[in-house]
Amino acid sequence: MLDALAAADWGRTLLLTDYNTRIAVIGAGCLGAAAGLVGTFLVLRRRALMADTLGHSTLPGVGLAFLVLAAFGKTPDALPWLLLGAAATAGLAAWLVAATQRIPRIREDAALAIVLGVLFGLGLAILGVIQQLGTGHAAGLGGFIDGSVASMRAQDSWTMVVLASAATLVTIVLFKALTVASFDPQQARLQGLPVRRLEFVQLGMVVVVTVAGIRAVGLILIIALLIVPPAAARPWSNRLSRVAVCAAGIGAFSGIVGAWISALVTGLPTGPVIVLVAVAAFGFSLLFGRARGILRRRGHAPAERLAH
Amino acid sequence: MDWSSLDTRIVLIASLAAIACVLPGTFLVLKRMSMLTHAIAHAVLPGLVIAFLFVGSSNLPGLMIGALIAGIVTTMLVQWLSSKARIEQGVATGIVFTALFALGIVLLRTFADRVHLHADCIIEGQLTLAAARKATFLGIELPRAAWLLLTVIGVNGVLLAIFWRPIVASVLDPDHARLNGMRPEWMQQLLMVMTAVTTIAAFEAVGSILVIALIVVPVATAILLSDRLIVVFGLALAIGVLCAVLGHVLAVVVPGPLTTALLGSDLGGRVDDTSSAGAIAVTYGIVFLLTALLFGRDAPLRKRLRATG
């Protein structure tokens, strides 16, 4: 069924000669690496599902930013502004979860669920309003729920690269301090580390990665990018630094391969394909991982804990 | 506002969804498994799509069975990963539901010409659409979604009535229940099946993401007001229904004047109403917040009154 033109198109995509696609695939790789690295600490602190709440909480922020831009008569599809709105409500969500948990009798799981449901509902209500404004561009907002690389312009991809690189850089610079603070807050405090502030920075990086990823991966599946690579890296080593590097590698691999496949096959959504690649890597690691893989585990040796 | 028969049907469906969600919701919140509902609501998608390919859209029981199998597979996978593969429960939940949801979306796009499910409808819910689709049963004409929810409420209600004691015992104190010859594991499985069925029935109306608000927030609000399980149960039902009605009214009344005030009449004048499902979730949030701050047993206002009086 492939005629000559389509074959040429296909070859071009395969080799990434199309500028927009190439930048988007590279961007997805940067995003995956950053998410793997930042996610390692999130998983270490046992706050995996926080990423789910933060991801869903970006929706009202995107909608509000859109409304503000529309009110000032600007073109309301300027990605950086929408992402700024997303970051604002995701940050608010992190604070709300902490505040809700402090209410007596409300536990962490309920706090996460309440904030997620209510803020996403607010987002849907705002989107409902936007759809009736009829200012055009509104259709593009649906892309934040689903995620799609195909519709990204080069500048959108660059925004993603910059945000992901910033999160990677901050995490690398603070790696030692974050490690001590996550493993043993008491010890960290004795060493004079600002434990609260480090926790704040760490959640901030999760927000940055989330916001960077919602355009390409979608806000529902962004949690997968943050937790699947670290979980896939864990069976390979018992040392945190190696797990972190491995998670970044698996994240980058998933981002690149996933975005590339979805660019090749028309109609395949980007976010889900990236997630499925990462999950395949997770399944492989779970079986064959050198340190804790199921097939490599000898007898009933006690599970070694993660160390510095 | 002009109240039409469509509004009545929307409110009816939303209230029934709220009632259906509170039945398993009470126990899920007490068992600290609130986020699992969110996982199930996403993970049923591939089951739904595959069932759709085999039995078609008109076969509701077939679709329910497909989704139910996916829901059960989800809970089993999460349990297997956390016990056998030693992965923390939150991580295991996150991996399983995102993997299944991603698979579901890919299937949906691949068979888009044969499966007439719309991803947006599943994620966001279409109350208006659900209210328009009617079905007649026993000579009574109601929205199809209402019949579905009534069936689920009936089945779950009967199951709860029969197994009330063992379920309550298993949730509040599993070890004690085991000593008394009960099977907490079985009760947990029963609860999971009830949750999956409820989730599937409710998300046609309110969407897969707002189901979590319906299941968790009324119960969390009720917990702030009472310590007795049966009272919590009753309060959650009442809060669920009241907020569903109030939420829809707000969705119709607020957006027009609010956007006109904020954006000016030439932009804001075009806005009539907004997503009822979204507004209902926000209403739940506001009621929860007010309860936590003002009326709850440990609310700051109550404490101050107690200190001064």
Image: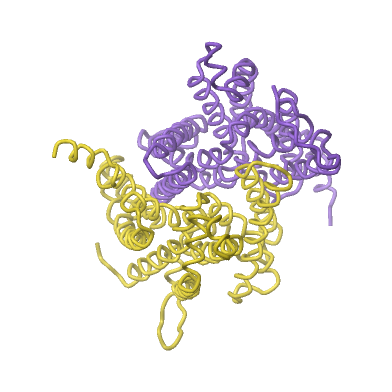
Chain colours: A purple, B yellow
Residue A132 visible, this orientation? no
In the displayed structure image, the side of residue A14 where residue A30 appears, left or right: left
Q: Nearer the viewer, residue A71 or A83?
A: A83
Instruction: Looking at this view, name the residue that lies furthest to the bottom.
Output: B139
Residue at the location (70% across, 50% down)? A268
Say which quadrant the N terminus of chain B sits in: bottom left
Q: Can you give x and y, in whole percent of width and height, for residue B292 in the image?
A: 31, 44
Instruction: Looking at this view, name the residue that lies furthest to the top.
Output: A192
In the displayed structure image, the side of residue A278 where residue A133 appears, left or right: left
Q: Nearer the viewer, residue B169 or B31?
A: B169
The answer to which quarter of the image holds residue A278 is top right
Q: Can you give x and y, in whole percent of width and height, for residue A100 in the image?
A: 40, 39
Residue at the location (72% across, 46% down)? A276
The answer to which quarter of the image holds residue A288 is top right
Q: Nearer the viewer, residue B191 or B288?
A: B191
Q: Nearer the viewer, residue B257 or A271?
A: A271
Residue A73 visible, this orientation? yes
